[in-house]
Image (cartoon, rainbow, N blue to C red):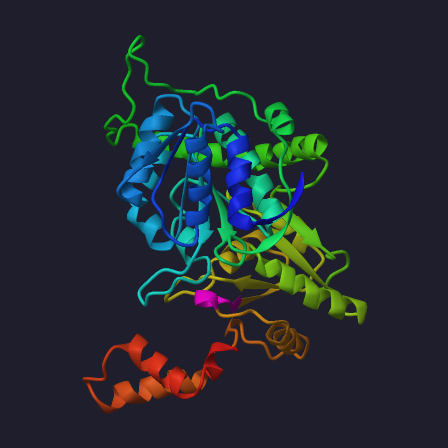
Amino acid sequence: MREQIEGSQAMARAVAACRPDVIAAYPISPQTHIVEGLSAMVKKGDLGTCEFLNVESEYGAMSACIGASASGARTYTATASQGLLYMVEPVYNASGLGLPIVMTVANRALGAPINIWNDHSDAMSQRDSGWLQLYAENNQEAADLHVQAFRIAEELSVPVMVCMDGFILTHSVEEVDLPEQEQVDRFLPPFVPRQELDPAHPLSIGAMVGPEAFTEVKYLQHMRQLDALTLIPQVQAEFAEIFGRDSGGLVRPYRCEDAETIVIALGSVLGTIKDVVDIRRDAGERIGVLGITSFRPFPFEAVREALTGARRFIAVEKAFSLGIGGIVASHCRRAAAGLGLDGYEVFAGLGGRPVTSRSLDEMFDHVRDGVLEEQTFLDLDRELVDAELEREHRTRRSGPVAENVMRDAHARGGESMGI
């Protein structure tokens, strides 16, 4: 059923249609509206016997989800940013225990400095946690990915993060074709856990594992991720057959046929990139876009196939690894090994800075002219950076960097913020 609806409320409706047994969550922007919507439905009795657990922290939320999932309940939670960091220990435990929990991560920058706006730093910080990570380009795909996530998680007995851009998607209102209950019931069978705590059949979950078996246990976790590379496209195909629309999968090529330049990105920034690429394509430039939906597991073969025949790729990244640089780009370089491509890392939208068509167009001009640096920070204000470096050179007691840079930016009327 099509509705004009806020992204968060659409996610709540999609999760509700999956008939969760337990929802445990702690509010943190920008995911709060999702769990608020679910709590209201539970209170009204719309979710049957579903139990909503009001916990005291994000650590408590994931800990409660672990207990619920281990007891055989279909389990869901949501978080963002510092909340995800606060639950890191049980996040790793959930994957290590092989529990099929589904969690929305409403992507938001990490502090310090404090920032509540969107980038991908939070989910990227957990890329090695053992959770599958699926990134949504828009709210329709985000809603569809939640339905698929329960199916994938429960077939493999692994936890899945559905990552959607905070505020850009969670708080935007657009038309979403909400999953119908009958369709979801056809697509998502009742949960049959691979492991379940049951007093009638006692067992332990979470044993101490020594050196004699630890490598093998971790290898089996890795194999589950690799199994997802086969399962995710199968789930995508079945979803399309039942729901009549194509969402999810590993990657989503756009105008990549005969492309010399392929732009690679995750999440909502793909929409802006496609708009710019359409104009340049129509002007005769051989450029395309590759959206990565599954970041974990990373679809090396699918990316390599998309890049075969191109001359270069540009990874537009909304997070980066301090001291090294590109996260997505490093994965793409491995995928493209031996193809002879030039690879570029472009960091954009950090801390919620707008990624504008004008800035992307200028960056593509630099690619065309052969002057784009291998590592580029889109719209970086060198004057602000140089002013702070000069301040630090002048005096040992230069003060806190964040406050200094913000003061300089405000003194210039926000020019450096890309507005």
Give the residue drawn at x 47%, y 62%. Answer: 326
Residue sitting at the far left? 397
Give the residue drawn at x 32%, y 14%. Answer: 198
- Is 243 displayed left or right of 329 in the figure? right
Relative height, residue 332 to residue 342 (above, below):
above
- Is 275 displayed left or right of 321 in the figure? right
Q: Is residue 16 visible?
A: yes
Observer-nearest of 273 and 406: 406
Relative height, residue 22 to residue 418 (above, below):
above
Q: Position of residue 122 (x, y in %)?
A: 40, 54
Give the residue drawn at x 55%, y 49%. Answer: 7
Relative height, residue 34 to residue 212 (above, below):
below
Q: What are the residue bounds of the magenta stretch?
A: 346-352
- Is 216 displayed left or right of 345 in the figure? left
- Is 348 magenta? The answer is yes
Callout count: 0
